[in-house]
Image (cartoon, helix red, strand yellow):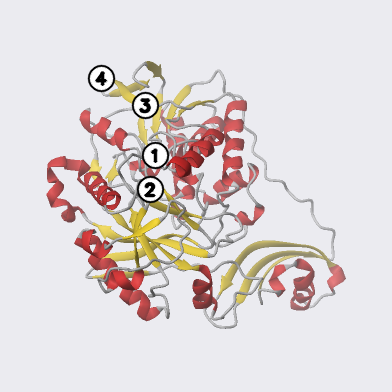
Amino acid sequence: MQKTINITLTPEQASEEKIYKPLVAKELKIKKSEISLIRVINRSIDARSRNIKVNLRLFVVFDEPAPKEEEINFKYQNVKNKTEIIIIGAGPAGLFAALRLIELGYKPIIFERGKQVSDRKNDIALLYKEQEVNPDSNYCYGEGGAGTFSDGKLFTRSKKRGNTQKILEVLKFHGANENILIDSHPHIGTDKLPKIIENIRETIINAGGEIHFNSRVTDFIIDDAQIKGVEINNDLKITAKAVILATGHSARDIYELLHKKNIQLQAKPFAMGVRIEHPQNLIDSIQYHCKVRSEYLPAATYNVVRQVNNRGVYSFCMCPGGFIVPASTSPNEMVVNGMSSSARNSKFANSAMVVEIRLEDLKEYEQYGELAGLKFQQHVEKLAFNNGGNKLVAPAQRMADFVNKRISNSLPETSYIPGIISSPLHFWLPEVISKPLQEGFKQFGKSIRNFLTNEAVIIGVESRTSSPVRIPRDKETFQHPQIKGLFPCGEGAGYAGGIVSSAVDGEKCAEKIALAF
């Protein structure tokens, strides 16, 4: 017999099958020896009370032999001589668009401005050593995009947009741990992602697709309102039936190029703020109601959101057991981001704390038209650089000091390797960011005991949570309304936010191409 059951256990009981198997037998009123298979379908933690529980959804087979395990497998046909489609950008949107095109019988040709992941690792190591930003190879640019060197969080609320389960299965097929198919908030880890990205590249190439690195798109070849191809590195011209534009939210030169060519763009709301870092054991004690986290529990997370004068203030990209990294893409700007390894075993917890930026907040930048938000981003990043220390040393302030508008005479230990320097963020951050953050922190502190503390440090600035520009596309065809054959895609085009939603959008763009060509 086969049955799916839900069972609630303690963290220790849920840690191993040999522990929870007799409990499953008791639940089903059968003998333990009768069970031939237990497979975890879903796992989540309920930490709302002091008695923390783990909820398991299990597929159980008993009184009959266990069925043969079905391996996740994807067969990618050879498309070497098929219709060619250009993809600009090798982030999640671009890579998953390529995989889906192969399934549909098209040949993807990817152009990535950065380097392949192994060389990119070397450039990031050099970033820390020399504290100089390579504008084409950094935490944002290169194979796999910003997602390669991230926590690899795979949780998304955009399940209505497409087949998110398939995205997880493709990642598992290319080397991710099977737990991503089970956990309610799955993640991969920055230590595991590079190999998975390399495996995806190998799949694309083995199927006859192409990936070209160090290949910056410098122009679009357009004739009679139809895209014919792209120019690479101010020299090479490549033609194809269609172009998927999947450049990510930091490829500002692409927005500038489109704007220069009078190709329609749209300004859109976005969010900006800071990174905040607490000791992980403090977050554990808050979330798990204990002094010391149980060995059977993962590093605790949090998610906070408030409305401050009808403006959203919220946490984003929370990295338990993580570290903060320099995410600048050009010299003379200061941008930070967060990530963590698969083990999430750092002694720090960090999260973006951001404020909703609306179009009416950008009146000082009206002369830039649709690029007003982008120019505001650049202004704040320049402010952070000028108020930081030498090169990548970031401006920082203790959390309670920021709220109370006090200079921090000292700073706590941090995971941010280039270092931090005391700076009055409450003074130089634009008021549209600083005031809502201060009030938001007060409200978070009232609802979460010990969250508002000088043990926490805020580091500036977190400015790349989303794109301030949308590249419009038709709702039905996904093509740009002005340019036939141009398919804006993913975070950079304003249609996704994170690894999974970007990958889903990449797949859907590929499917729209199959309908159009």
For the residues carrying marks 3 and 4, which lies nearer the camera in this image?
3
Name the quarter where the C terminus is drawn.
top left
The amino acid type found where label 1 is placed reads Val
Q: Earlier in the sequence, mark 3 or mark 4?
A: 3
Q: Earlier in the sequence, mark 3 or mark 2?
A: 3
Q: Is residue 243 above or below residue 149?
A: above
Residue 224's tag is 4
From the viewer's side, name the closer residue of 106 and 313: 313
- Check disc 2 and report its element: helix, strand or loop: loop
Residue 392's tag is 2
Snapshot quadrant of residue 31: bottom right
Per the model, the C-alpha gap separating discs 2 and 4 is 46 Å
Q: Label 1, on which residue?
A: 133
Q: Label 3, on which residue?
A: 217
- Is the C-beta separation of discs 4 and 1 under 8 Å? no
Per the model, the C-alpha gap separating discs 3 and 1 is 20 Å
Write the residue at 81% across / 57% down. 66
- Is the C-beta separation of discs 1 and 2 under 8 Å? yes
Write the residue at 50% across / 50% down. 150
From the viewer's side, name the closer residue of 160 and 93: 93
Q: Position of residue 512 (x, y in %)?
A: 42, 35
For the residues carrying marks 4 and 1, which lies nearer the camera in this image?
1
- Is the C-beta separation of discs 2 and 4 under 8 Å? no
Q: Is residue 182 above or below residue 194?
A: below
Q: Earlier in the sequence, mark 2 or mark 4?
A: 4
Q: Earlier in the sequence, mark 4 or mark 1?
A: 1
